[in-house]
Amino acid sequence: MATQKHTLVALVNDKPGVLNRVVSLFRRRGFNIDSIAVGHSEVQHLSRVTIIVNGTTYTVEQVRKQLDKLIDVVKIFDITSEKNTTRELALVKVKATSATRSEILEIADIFRANIVDVASDTLTIEITGDEDKIESMLKLLKTFGIKEIARTGRVAMIRGTLGAPPPDDKPVRSRVKRENA
Amino acid sequence: MKKTGAQILCESLIAEGVDVMFGFPGGVLLPFYDTLPQYPQIRHILVRHEQGAAHAADGYARATGRVGVCMATSGPGATNLVTGIANAYLDSVPMVAITGQVVREQIGKDAFQEIDITGITLPITKHSYVAMDTAHLAKIVHEAFYIARTGRPGPVLIDIPKDVFTDQAELTVPSRVELPGYKIPSQGHPAQLKNAAKLINEAKKPLIIAGRGVIISGASAALREFAEKAQVPVITTLLGIGCFPENHALSYGMAGMHGTGYANKALESCDLLIAIGMRFDDRVTGKISAFVPHAKIIHIDLDPAEIGKNVPVDIPIVGDVKPVLLSLQKLVENNSRISWLQQLDEWRQQHPMLDIKDGDKLLPQRIIREIYEATNGDAIVVTGVGQHQMWTAQHYFFDKPDTFISSGGLGTMGFGLPAAMGAKVGKPDKIVWCIDGDGSIQMTIQELATLVQDDIAVKIAIINNGYLGMVRQWQDLFYKKNYVATPLTCPDFVKIAEAYCMAGITVTKREEIRPAIDQAMAHEGPFLVNFMVEPEENVYPMVPPGESNVNFLEQPKKEVSAWQRRSTP
């Protein structure tokens, strides 16, 4: 079976150790995570994790099911086959001399990137976009000498009104009778 | 009124119905043990090694269907639980393991006896907690028990720092559990149930393979009704033993590496496999590419992650086994399938693998058979791991669920004695036999002291062949009898028993078997029988590792005598 990049989106409890549980499952099944991004979601106490992972549909589905079993994972879905928007932010520190500075500024302009810091011999550029856009800009900047790159990892969302389903409003409840049976 | 964390823990355990726990104290648990006598409802059994506590909780849980509880102190106490927790995880046993932890401000500072036990047990627990606030303790305990026993059961660990035991908080009794991320699958999809019934009705040679999921779900009766109505023969996995009466006309024993030849032949030629509450372990499937080559597969399991994990499935039914079987039973037609069942019976005649060699030698198979006869098949039988385990699975006939207790997934040597202890504590009115190997029992033999101290009347049969027998068998068959690191110089087990102030007897002759078994059962307390068996006896049939199930090796035929199967109850 052919491997492809899968985009998994998970809503997880915002508690210590939860990310560890998620990530260690990937380790156990032998997956190398391409990128992972974590942040707050629209629901209080829930974080949203976007994981990009390479694998066959079968193996990724196995991991998704295993992740779904984690009690701290409230929802998880594979949005690879959906139409979705993915974005990543990168900060790039490029060597700049008075001779090259304007050329670099021009490239940044083409990619609608921002200059966030200027020093005597460097420029720091902030770029947002999908992976291709960032890679293309980095390729162009390479000739000037890149001193440092910081990337956030991708975040993703399904296009249109049909988003990821919200977490169940009906939580699991135990029987009132509290018997060990 | 405010209570200490230790009091809150005790009261929460009692609220969950805990009447017994297996534990071992230590520095950080002192506040808890200081409080425990205030709650005489909880019987605490002091083990000799924390691994024993975890296995005992495991055996207790399997024998009773309730959640087993074990406790250990921080650091080495906690790490000693790990094997037992892993064992419970792989066999889906409901367990709550409680560990002490260093005081909160010392966490992360490599304090004395500090270890990150939640980190260590991450891949072998269903869930885990670090209780960092006394006020949350009651809620955590309630959730832990709920998670351990519901859905696919498993072990849950609660790590409690010492000062959480001593801090005070209001005890608020949690009335419900709110776990939005915890999903318990339903009754099975109606459309899939219909599709399954259609396949079953159309199948000429259907076969049921039943696993421990049937036992966990309490679905033995439902399975029997379903199998009888559709006249589908039933084979089981190792841990499925007992979920279907082995003396039933439709029962064809255990499948897999040491399964019966006819069960493995049935797998080879069936046209529909109905897999119920089992997970296609490699010891059952043999060479996976050659597994059920002519069959479609219906897989019924509570855990969606098990569907399609090892074997592609034609009809997945995710749901609790019992309601699924009850619905399926209504949908399937009455059937006779005479020719298929005749075929299976023919194979049973051709491969009488459960028969025992004649002669005066002290054969392990005969010992198991005689324990079966002596107990009328009504005992709880707990095993260690090795040849004796397989002989027990083959030669004791289990008719009821929860009566065969064995370490399946992890294959933990040393499981037998402490698990038998837990089973006997949970079911004091039952006769509990621990059938163990001389290698296996030495891994946890110190629990003999626990049996004596708490007067737990486990009957122990050591199948003593002076070898790590199963490994020796592999060396015999696949490594040119190069017996490296398998011969054992064993102690005199009867003297060991005596040293623990326990009764015991050694058996060396065939005619002494039954009297020794009777003597053990007539004895009031725990009793040990040391059977000095034929040293190089092998377990047959055997599917060589990596081979297809149908290529099983059989016992040399000339030595075999027939054994009369008991009729259908």
Image: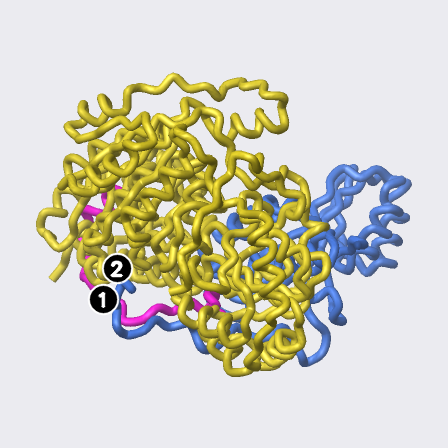
Q: Secondary structure beneath disc 1? A: loop
- Is B197 situated above or below B351? below
Identify the subunit bearing mark 2. Answer: B
What letter labels the chain drawn in blue?
Answer: A
Q: Which residues are magenta?
A: B160-185
Identify the subunit bearing mark 1. Answer: B
Q: Quadrant of the N terminus of chain A?
A: bottom right
- In the image, is B495 to the left or to the right of B84? left
Q: Label 2, on which residue?
A: B138
Q: Position of residue B545 (x, y in %)?
A: 63, 38
Q: Quadrant of the C terminus of chain A?
A: bottom left
- Write the residue at 56% across / 52% down: B349
Q: Residues within 10 Å of mark 1 (few under 14, many from 20)?
A: few
Q: Position of residue B415 (x, y in %)?
A: 37, 39
Name the one closer to the observer, B209 or B423. B209
**Main SS, magenta residues:** loop
Q: Label 1, on which residue?
A: B173
Dividing the picture into quadrants, the one containing residue B558 is top right
Q: Secondary structure beneath disc 2? A: helix
Q: Say whether marks 2 and 1 touch (CB < 8 Å).
A: yes
Name the one closer to the observer, B109 or B251. B251
- Is B330 situated above or below B482? below
The disc placed on residue B101 is none
- Write the residue at 54% across / 18% down: B484
Q: Are marks 2 and 1 on the same chain?
A: yes
Q: Colour of chain B?
A: yellow
